[in-house]
Image (cartoon, helix red, strand yellow):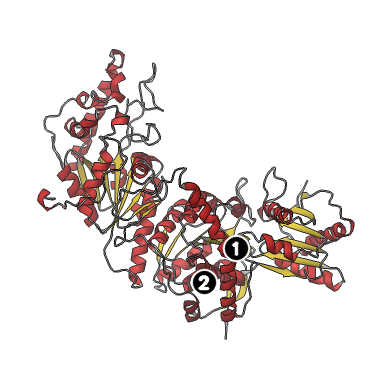
């Protein structure tokens, strides 16, 4: 019988990391990620874990230390937000290219300036091309479940890529929910100690991080992309195994109402919950609407999106980040590219919302559905990229 | 004290690397690895040493070697050290491993000082060796916080009005010692036994140890490739580079220089100081000599020595 604990999103992640028997946590505090680090240091202080907690002097050193530990063969976790993620940016490319299966919790937060501690996806979108697998949780339960699964996926010898588990700053990081947690032994069975292929080990000296000039560099980069191709299969396998253990079903994406929907919203993170509640109401009113929530943002589920939208007439992509001067927001661009790649002609509206923690409520979502239904009816998208909920 | 006869003949830094003739770095690394032995993990900041020893698919390293980036050798070393500790705790590792970080002066005095400070404060058990060649040599001889006053570099050129770098060199070992670490020292390649003994002490110390070794660079110093060790000796004998250690907070002068040569003897063979020997910059030479004298007196005071 599953235990239910009252945990915030941050606490749920920290608890999952504890159960994952992580060897090294190297992290630096930043709101709204702090609770993850605080709670984990309590586990260390109370002798509840065997882990080394490296309380580094910056996020740059956090990721640097994680790379060193991961290469040595340790299971490694770190966490950050916003400016911290931006400071890690340089190291994130190296972590993925050196094939370090690090798991990182990211409590998504707006980037300065102006300084703002509240939730949006600008931080992670700024690091989206760093070669990391990127997962977005809708609630604390998902943050817990994905964190446990992340280690198994990252450390798979066919993958060996780092993973971020994203949770919306404050909305998830600081809100308490009932989280069904597994027993320690169950997690241990699902996640045995890491068995690295190669390690930094004096018994088998290895040179890691050599200089690669134009005659070799390109192949290394090509291999990273190849590793990404294995990820969906490994995620599915992991999800199936985890479902048997927990009874909770995960996947690349979650689609609600798409079997008959004409108009849908596609988004990441906690907004999906609000969108689904509104969609249920609208469907009761007889409106054919749906919600697509991407759990996995990188690798991007190109084919799955094309498949799941096949009966749709209009799609609104909600972006909680802005790519200044670009044709669409980051998520909007990816969806548009996916559709174009398969020559799918679907009316697309891209809305930038919620920057700096600006709230998006059911009435906002309802208005977006109404607009999307109208587009489905008329086929006309007046303004393909727009801001919502902002003073113009 | 290291004994020559007891040193292994085995070379853990293979020959055939691409470091320049006369480069002090390979000498410093070779000697350090002879002391450290095979059970050593090296992490290397970006720089000449990294670039010239590991052009893929070749490597000169017979010990495990990790390069991550420029500014974080100490942070990477922290991670490696912590990983061994945690893995030992769960029974996945049971041997003692030396962790050595090598970085140049740019990667230490400037861009890497935060990571080094953090690692020292946290007390990781590792040895950090700064190969101080007094400028960003890998990118083409730009000035760093370690470049001495008056030296010409590509970003502190000897101009008509400004004769080389106007600022003075940072006191790296003073900064490290202020962290209260168990061991910090300067070293000169001309005093091999002193340097290698310091590597031994640094590795034996429980906690962070830092050695700053002057590493002549014929390209950047505009000096003869055959004279690097001679310059290393002149640096000490002119009192330009005091050789001392700070062990448990106690300063000790390791090489006494009762009859110092004028600092010009160290500066003259190096093209980077050539402009200072023009009559209009005589004052600069005097200023450098004054700095050397004052620095020496300061170190003597710290070491409790009188001459």
**Depth check, front residue: A19 or A162:** A162
Query: Where is B147 relative to B123, above or below?
Result: above
In the image, taking residue A59 as reference, residue B77 lies left or right, namely: left
Query: Where is A107 relative to A212, above or below?
Result: below
**Depth check, front residue: A345 or A138:** A345
Percent x, y for residue B250? 20, 48
Query: Where is A13 relative to B69, above or below?
Result: below
Q: Chain of mark 2?
A: A
Q: Chain of mark 1?
A: A
How far separated are the C-alphas under marks 1 and 2?
15 Å
Mark 1 or mark 2: which is in front? 1
**Depth check, front residue: A215 or A203:** A215
In the image, taking residue A257 as reference, residue A204 lies left or right, namely: left
Give the residue drawn at x 74%, y 66%: A308
Identify the element where label 2 is drawn: helix
Q: Quadrant of residue B106?
A: top left
Q: Indicate which disc, 1 or 2, sits on the residue closer to the N terminus.
A: 2
Give the residue drawn at x 57%, y 71%: A144
How many other residues sit within 10 Å of disc 2, few (<14), some (14-19) or many (≥20)?
many
The residue sitting at the bottom extreme is: A1
Q: Which residue is mark 1?
A: A135
Q: Which mark is residue A16?
A: 2
Identify the element where label 1 is drawn: strand
Give the residue drawn at x 18%, y 25%: B262
**Depth check, front residue: B278 or B216:** B216
Placement of the N terminus of chain A among the 4 image quadrants: bottom right
The answer to whether residue A284 of the structure is visible from this angle is yes
């Amino acid at each position: 019988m599953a235990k239910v604990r009252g945990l915030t999103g941050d606490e749920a992640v920290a608890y999952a990391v504890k159960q994952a028997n992580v060897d090294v946590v190297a992290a630096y505090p930043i709101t709204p990620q702090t609770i993850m680090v605080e709670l984990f240091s309590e586990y260390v202080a109370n002798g509840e874990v065997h882990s080394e907690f490296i309380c580094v002097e910056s996020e740059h050193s956090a990721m640097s230390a994680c790379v060193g530990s991961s290469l040595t063969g340790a299971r490694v976790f770190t966490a950050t937000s916003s400016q911290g993620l931006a400071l890690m940016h340089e190291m994130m490319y190296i972590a993925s290219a050196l094939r370090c299966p690090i798991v990182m919790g990211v409590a998504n937060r707006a980037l300065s300036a102006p300084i703002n501690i509240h939730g949006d996806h600008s931080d992670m979108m700024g690091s989206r091309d760093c070669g990391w697998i990127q997962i977005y949780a809708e609630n604390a339960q998902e943050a817990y479940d994905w964190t446990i699964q992340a280690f198994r996926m990252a450390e798979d010898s066919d993958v060996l890529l780092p993973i971020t588990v994203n949770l919306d700053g404050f909305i998830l990081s600081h809100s308490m929910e009932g989280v069904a947690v597994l027993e320690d032994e169950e997690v241990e069975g699902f996640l045995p100690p890491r068995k690295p292929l190669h390690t930094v080990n004096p018994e088998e000296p290895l040179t890691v991080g050599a200089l690669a000039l134009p005659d070799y560099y390109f192949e290394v980069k090509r291999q990273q992309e190849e590793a990404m191709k294995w990820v969906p299969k490994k995620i599915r396998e992991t999800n199936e195994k985890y479902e048997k253990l927990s009874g909770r079903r995960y996947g690349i994406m979650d689609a609600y109402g798409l079997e008959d929907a004409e108009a849908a919203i596609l988004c990441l993170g906690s907004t999906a919950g609000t969108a689904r509640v509104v969609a249920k109401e609208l469907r009761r009113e007889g409106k054919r609407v749906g919600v697509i929530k991407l759990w996995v943002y990188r690798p991007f589920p190109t084919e799955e999106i094309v498949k799941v939208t096949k009966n749709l007439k209009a799609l609104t992509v909600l972006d909680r980040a802005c790519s200044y001067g670009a044709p669409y927001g980051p998520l909007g661009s990816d969806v548009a590219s996916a559709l174009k790649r398969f020559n799918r002609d679907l009316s697309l509206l891209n809305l930038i919302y919620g920057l700096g923690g600006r709230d998006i409520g059911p009435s906002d979502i309802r208005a977006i559905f109404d607009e999307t239904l109208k587009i489905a009816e008329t086929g006309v998208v007046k303004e393909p990229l727009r801001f919502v909920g902002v003073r113009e | 004290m290291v004994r020559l006869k007891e040193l292994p003949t085995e070379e853990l830094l293979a020959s055939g690397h691409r470091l320049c003739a006369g480069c002090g770095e390979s000498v410093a690394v070779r000697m350090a690895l002879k002391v450290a032995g095979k059970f050593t993990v090296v992490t290397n900041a970006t720089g000449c040493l990294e670039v010239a020893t590991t052009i893929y698919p070749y490597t000169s390293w017979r010990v495990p070697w990790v390069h991550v980036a420029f500014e974080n050798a100490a942070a990477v070393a922290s991670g490696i050290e912590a990983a061994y500790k945690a893995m030992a705790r769960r029974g996945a590792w049971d041997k003692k491993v030396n962790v050595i970080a090598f970085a140049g002066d740019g990667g230490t005095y400037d861009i890497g000082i935060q990571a080094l400070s953090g690692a020292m404060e946290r007390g990781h058990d590792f040895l950090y060796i700064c190969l101080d060649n007094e400028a960003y040599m890998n990118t083409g001889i730009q000035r760093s916080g370690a470049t001495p006053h008056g030296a010409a570099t590509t970003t502190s050129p000897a101009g008509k009005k400004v004769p080389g770098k106007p600022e003075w060199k940072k006191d790296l070992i003073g900064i490290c010692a202020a962290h209260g670490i168990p061991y910090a020292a300067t070293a000169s390649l001309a005093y091999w036994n002193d340097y290698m003994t310091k590597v031994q002490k640094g590795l034996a110390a429980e906690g962070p140890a830092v050695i700053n070794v002057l590493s002549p660079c014929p390209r950047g110093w505009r000096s003869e490739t055959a004279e690097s060790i001679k310059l290393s000796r002149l640096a000490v004998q002119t009192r330009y580079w005091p050789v001392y250690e700070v062990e448990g907070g106690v300063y000790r002068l390791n090489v006494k220089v009762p009859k110092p040569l004028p600092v010009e003897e160290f500066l003259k063979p190096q093209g980077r100081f050539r402009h200072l020997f023009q009559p209009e910059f005589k004052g600069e030479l005097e200023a450098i000599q004054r700095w050397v004298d004052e620095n020496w007196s300061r170190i003597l005071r710290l070491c409790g020595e009188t001459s």
